[in-house]
């Protein structure tokens, strides 16, 4: 890489030019600058020995305190760690500090003993070895020629000035001595034109950029009298105002109202005519509204006076205002007819609504104004005075200084040369030269030109100066030290799940007027609406707690006096889930659940299968028992009852049909199983299978058994001969009948009849 080196003569020209600019700046600062600031060790400086101040491209100031570094954050300073093992040790002692910019991001710093290599993009010190310092760069540093301009970051040059040890030192010291600053070591102007002066023992003195400061008026200045006269109070007269009909409304001794007619001096008292006036003990002021209406405000409420009818009416929306305070200090109407009400505890805005025509005589004016809005963001809510400037912008004197209300709210502070003290009641006026005057003491007032005090500059970009993500507190132990992740690593180094409380610190680095800046921020995707920050100290912060794991983008932007929002600064970061919420863990959970489900399903199916098997076994056993009982009944009984020799309705129906078919052909010795199957309209094989299932016999055996059981009944109940009986039940010969009968019943037909006859006797 080609490293740019400034020639010796160019350095000399730059130094001479800068000393001249510095001289002019210091002279102007002496005459017009606002109060200076003083930063010491109490503000975060490592020591009071400030030897080097360098402005970084983003507007931060890098401070070198005898080899210990820190960074400005808009309000104070944060430590900047430096590992001295990364620095290059100079072979010879030097008595001068210096810096050198390589391109726009690498800053080379030199002190008495070392050379440092600082990366302005990552805010870290890098290795500075001989490989980086070969040739002309090292020689330039050793020859005290390494002072170069700060990179151009905002469309303008910003010079980093180092007080030399040679000829120019005395002249610069003389200029700084004129500011009563001693033991100076270095001086640098920032991008806003503010002057940073480092001292040997007492930190940094900061002088804001040039602005014409407000003027303090004291003692017998006529401007003080003019401002105090704005309250309309003089002697016993509390106030006196001109009415539209040329009469005057006069208040004396705090609470006595009267009219004064043109050309007459004797007042026309109202208190006796309007008894309701007696409730108001201290009338503060009055304001003409529309037509005959006058608003009169007091220390214990406000009301409307109808100057034609001499009647009272409620003050518009008083019930809302008096939730905060009943003490009214000032009321003003702006050029649009809107009503501004200043109380002891808040400023209220009532927008003018419908207007009455000229020929109308309204009896209720409350409908003229919309419900009030309480103004938020004031440094102090006790409103002492209200006044419009030449641009019709509203200003308020409070118990803690002055604030501009419209077109945007700005609380003025000592940064603007405004004392943050109590302003006097209703003691504010606009002069013919467009200056505003506020009295804050019977013998003191401040005047300023609004356009000179508040300059409408473009908003500055926001810099996220620091993030903090403390680890969780361990049970029974104190929390360990807070860790501060570097912004440059948040994108690539996710935060662990137990560091999900994160605070962002951010600033516009507006060292001149930090109180003029307003911030808004949000954290996507959990926030879509902006959060406003009222911190006017120079550095604001946003804290988020208990963030769930995920990817986030922090967005922040700022507005200044113009209330135009500047560019959005973003910072993306990731909070990693705990191991039990990782994808791998979730996969394991899923596999475990699936395994458990499969195992549970198998167990269930196995148990269900066993239950079914047991139920089937029980049913089979029961069926077997029923079948055995049916077959036993069929074998033992001479009667054939289909209900008792079958186990279900289908079998019973089949046996009933079979018995009927056999009975029709019982005397036909040719009637066999094949004919029976035909009568049943089933095949012989099917009939065979059914008979085997029901009685365990063949259809032929069933036909023969039915014949024999019919014969047994006839033997017991009739007097027919055995031959006649055998013929009637389909046996061809008595001999065959007798053989079959004995085989079934164990006795011959004659013996069976004899046994039955004897059993009847």
Image (spheres, grey):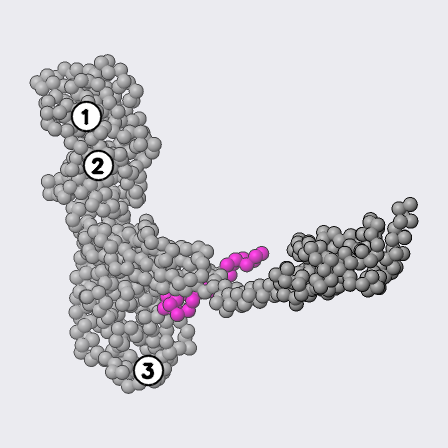
- Give the extent of the magenta segment: 472-496
Secondary element at image label 2 = loop
Which quadrant would residue 242 be assigned to in this image? top left
Of residues 201 and 153, the one nearer the viewer is 153
Image quadrant where one finds the N terminus: bottom left
- Local packing at callout 2 (Cα closer than 10 Å; few below 14, some 14-19, many 20+) is some
Camera-near label (1 vs 3) is 1
Mark 1 and mark 3 lie on one chain; the one further toward the N terminus is 3
Mark 3 and mark 2 lie on one chain; the one further toward the N terminus is 3
Say which mark, if any, is on residue 351: 2
* Number of numbered callouts drawn: 3
Secondary element at image label 1 = strand
Is 280 positioned to the left or the right of 696 in the image? left
Q: Are marks 3 and 2 in contact (CB under 8 Å)?
A: no
Q: Is residue 68 magenta?
A: no
Query: Does residue 424 appear in this view?
Result: no
Which residue is the site of mark 1?
A: 294
- Local packing at callout 3 (Cα closer than 10 Å; few below 14, some 14-19, many 20+) is few
- Residue 93: percent from left, percent from top: 35, 79
- Residue 441: percent from left, percent from top: 25, 37
Which residue is the site of mark 3?
A: 132
């Amino acid at each position: 890489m080609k490293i740019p080196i400034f020639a010796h003569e160019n350095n000399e020209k730059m130094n001479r030019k800068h000393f001249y600019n510095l001289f002019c700046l210091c002279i102007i600062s002496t005459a017009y600058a606002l109060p200076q600031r003083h930063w010491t060790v109490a503000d975060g400086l490592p020591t009071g020995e400030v030897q080097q101040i360098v402005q970084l491209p983003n507007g931060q100031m890098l401070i070198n305190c005898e080899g210990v570094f820190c960074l400005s954050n808009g309000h104070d300073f944060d430590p900047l760690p430096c590992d001295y093992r990364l620095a290059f040790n100079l072979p010879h002692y030097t008595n001068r500090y210096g810096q050198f910019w390589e391109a726009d991001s690498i800053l080379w710093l030199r002190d008495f003993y070392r050379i440092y290599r600082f990366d302005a993009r990552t805010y870290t010190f890098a290795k500075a070895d001989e490989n980086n310092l070969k040739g002309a760069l090292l020689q330039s540093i050793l020859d005290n020629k390494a002072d170069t301009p700060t990179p151009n970051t905002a469309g303008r040059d910003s010079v980093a000035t180092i007080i030399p040890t040679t000829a120019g030192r005395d002249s610069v010291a003389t200029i700084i001595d004129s500011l009563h600053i001693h033991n100076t070591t270095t001086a640098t102007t920032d991008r806003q034109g503010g002057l940073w002066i480092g001292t040997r023992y007492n930190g940094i003195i900061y002088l804001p950029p040039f602005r014409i400061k407000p003027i303090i008026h004291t003692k017998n200045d006529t401007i003080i009298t003019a401002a105090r006269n704005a309250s309309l109070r003089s002697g016993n007269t509390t106030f006196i105002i001109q009415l539209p009909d040329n009469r005057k409304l006069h208040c004396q001794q705090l609470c006595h109202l009267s009219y004064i007619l043109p050309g007459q001096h004797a007042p026309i008292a109202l208190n006796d005519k309007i008894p309701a006036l007696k409730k108001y003990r201290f009338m503060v002021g009055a304001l003409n509204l529309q037509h005959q209406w006058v608003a009169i405000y007091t220390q214990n409420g406000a009301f409307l006076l109808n100057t034609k009818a001499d009647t009272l009416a409620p003050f518009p929306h008083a019930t809302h205002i008096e939730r905060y305070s009943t003490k009214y200090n000032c009321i003003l109407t702006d050029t649009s007819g809107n009503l501004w009400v200043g109380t002891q505890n808040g400023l209220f805005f009532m927008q003018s609504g419908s207007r009455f025509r000229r020929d109308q005589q309204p009896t209720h004016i409350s409908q003229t104004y919309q419900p009030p809005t309480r103004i938020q963001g004031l440094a102090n809510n006790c409103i002492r005075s209200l006044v419009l400037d030449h641009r019709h912008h509203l200003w308020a004197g409070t118990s803690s200084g002055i604030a501009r209300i419209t077109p945007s709210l700005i609380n003025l502070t000592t940064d603007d040369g405004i004392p943050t003290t109590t302003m006097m009641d209703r003691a504010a006026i606009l002069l013919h030269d467009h200056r505003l005057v506020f009295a804050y003491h019977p013998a003191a007032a401040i005047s300023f030109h609004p356009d000179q005090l508040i300059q409408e500059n473009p908003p500055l970009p926001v810099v996220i100066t620091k993030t903090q993500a403390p680890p969780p507190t361990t049970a029974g132990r104190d929390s360990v030290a807070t860790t501060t992740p570097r912004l440059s690593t948040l994108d690539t180094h996710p935060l662990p799940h137990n560091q999900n409380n994160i605070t962002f610190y951010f600033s516009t680095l507006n060292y001149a007027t930090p109180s003029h800046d307003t911030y808004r921020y949000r954290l996507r995707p959990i926030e879509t609406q902006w959060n406003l920050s009222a911190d006017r100290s120079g550095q604001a912060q946003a804290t988020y707690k208990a963030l769930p794991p995920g990817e986030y983008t922090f967005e922040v932007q700022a507005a200044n006096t113009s209330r135009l929002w500047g560019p959005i600064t973003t910072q993306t970061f990731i909070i990693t889930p705990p191991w039990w919420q990782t994808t791998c863990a979730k996969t394991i959970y899923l596999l475990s659940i699936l395994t458990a489900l499969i195992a549970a399903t198998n167990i269930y199916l196995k148990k269900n299968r066993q239950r079914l098997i047991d139920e089937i076994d029980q049913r089979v056993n029961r069926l077997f028992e029923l079948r055995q009982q049916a077959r036993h009944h069929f074998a033992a009984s001479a009667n054939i009852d289909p209900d008792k020799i079958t186990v279900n309705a289908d079998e019973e129906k089949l046996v009933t049909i079979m018995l009927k078919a056999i009975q029709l052909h019982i005397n036909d010795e040719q009637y066999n199983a094949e004919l029976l199957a035909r009568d049943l309209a089933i095949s012989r094989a099917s009939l065979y299978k059914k008979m085997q299932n029901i009685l365990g016999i063949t259809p032929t055996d069933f036909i023969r058994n039915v014949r024999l059981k019919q014969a047994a009944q006839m033997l017991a109940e009739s007097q027919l001969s055995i031959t006649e009986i055998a013929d009637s039940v389909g046996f061809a010969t008595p001999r065959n009948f007798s053989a079959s009968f004995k085989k079934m019943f164990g006795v011959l037909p004659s013996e069976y009849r004899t046994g039955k006859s004897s059993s009847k006797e």
